Amino acid sequence: MAETEHAPGLATPTRGVRSDCRHPPVIRITHWITAVAFLCLVISGVAILLAHPRLYWGETGVRSGPSLIDLPLPFVLESPIRGPGRYLHFLSAWISLFAGLIYLINGLFTYHFRKHLLPARSDLNWKQIRQVILRHLRFERPPKEEALAYNLLQRLAYLLVIFVLFPLMFWTGLAMSPAVVSVNPTIVTIFGGQQSARTIHFFIASFLVLFLVIHILMVCLAGFTVRNRAMITGRIASGKETI
Amino acid sequence: MSESITRRKLITTGLAAAAGLAGLKAAAHIADHYGFLAPDHSGVLGAGEALTYGTQRILMARHSTAREFNRSEISKIIPVNGEPPNTDSYQRLLAGGFADWRLTVDGLVGCPSTFSLAELKRLPSRSQITHQACEEGWSFIAEWSGVPLSYILNLVGVRPEAKWAVFFALDDAWDSIDMPEAFHPQTLLVLGMNGQELPTRHGAPLRVRVPRQLGQKSKKYLSRIMVTDTVKNIGKGWGAVDPEYGFSWYMGI
């Protein structure tokens, strides 16, 4: 806490000396809090879903009626997992909300999004995009300078996760709450009903899990130890290590 | 250099944690005073419950009405969970058309009373077509009719120190709601469903409908409503029987 408060005053001289600081503390801390909370959300989300692994569209849906998708999962009603699952789900949701808000506010004040995540206009052309995609598809190791900055695909993926997918997760989650929608029904009617919100909640969660898998894959490809050290200690590799 | 930073970090983290804990304790005390704490808020996982309940109570303080639907939107298939109480006394009541059944309303009220089914049917009734989601994930829309709980509570006179309305059922289930929920115009003591008498498996002779919470809160087969200022001395003190099976007390989620 005190670290970050000191940061503005110290920023200029320290940054000049310690050019090896990859990720500032706020981003590192909120990253790992979100990582743990997200894992808990996925685990508890599955525990809740298993009570009724069937998805519907509209306001209502029942087991003996028509469905949108029957997930190839068993109905788990007897084992007591969804009650505790729900406690864990909401606790983790709150924690990820707080971490997300701290990250967002910090990002706005430090111009993190503008400086590090918003792609340069010159990069947004098909030639560049194709190049980056091809490099990823060939599983090529990223060039050295990428240890210090995000590439185009990373930027787009992170922006999507931060500004579209996570907010939609919260929104569709709230749209399933009878108490929240009693304050403002538009929260749920905009999706076409409570069951639609549930279905969208499931699919965005699946997207986020896919993102996590690719994210971890890419970290492994770019150097698991080096990248994790950067996200834990903030420092990138010293000279002798290969990036 | 790096070691002194570590020590400074440790001290500041420790101080922050201590301040945080003290702050949390103070916050819990204030929240409890204003009725923003769920009965099952204690424990690590309970922190999420306390936050959810408190926040939603603040959100719902000014205006909050569950959506009501058209007749055409009533679900064709309405499943039901659980069986009616498998007791001799319930079967006897059922066979007698619930003529011998009584609803007791007592606790912190001016005038503890009992109501027969016929008496309840003579009270002013209200119908509403609402969405009910089971905590399992499925949901349906149905029309419910009956006496607003607020009408009964006003009839018996609730004392100012009252905080919870506790429902006791013929099948030993019990649950509770807070006073804002109990006095909400859509909280209904249900006698009929989709224009007919309340079906046995849906909770006959009487169930409560709390449309701003998941279906689990709408307890069936009621026999007694007790108004109280604490639920600590009922069961394990967690506000309902459901938390004893791992579910949260608050079902507005």
Image: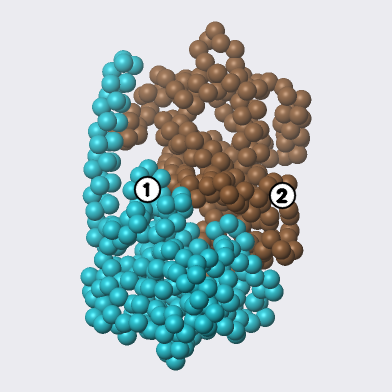
Chain letter for the residue marked with disc 1 in the picture: B
Tell me residue A108's x, y (percent). Answer: 45, 44
Same chain for mark 1 and mark 2? The answer is no
Residue A15 visible? The answer is yes
Helix, strand or loop at label 2? It is loop
B35 in relation to A242, above or below: below
Q: Which of A222 and B137 is in front in this view?
A: B137
Tell me residue B181's x, y (percent). Answer: 39, 71
Task: Say which amino acid is labelled 2.
Answer: Leu
B141 in relation to A196, above or below: below
Tell me residue B24's x, y (percent). Answer: 28, 46
Alpha carbon distance from label 1 to label 2: 32 Å
Image quadrant in which the N terminus of chain A is located: top left
In which quarter of the view is residue A134 placed? top right
Q: How crowded is mark 2: few (under 14 residues within 10 Å), some or many (20 or more)?
A: few
B40 sits left or right of B85 in the view: left
Which residue in the protein does label 2 denote? A71
A24 sits left or right of B34 in the view: right
Task: Say which amino acid is labelled 1.
Answer: Ala
Q: Nearer the viewer, residue A67 or A200?
A: A67
Query: In the picture, which chain is cyan?
Result: B
Q: Nearer the viewer, residue B154 or A20?
A: B154
Which residue in the protein does label 1 denote? B47
Q: Residue at x 46, y 60 (%)?
A: B251
Q: Which label sits on residue A214?
A: none
Chain letter for the residue marked with disc 2 in the picture: A
Q: Chain A is drawn in which colour?
A: brown
A125 in relation to B130, above or below: above
In which quarter of the view is residue B182 placed? bottom left
Tell me residue A5's x, y (percent). Answer: 31, 35
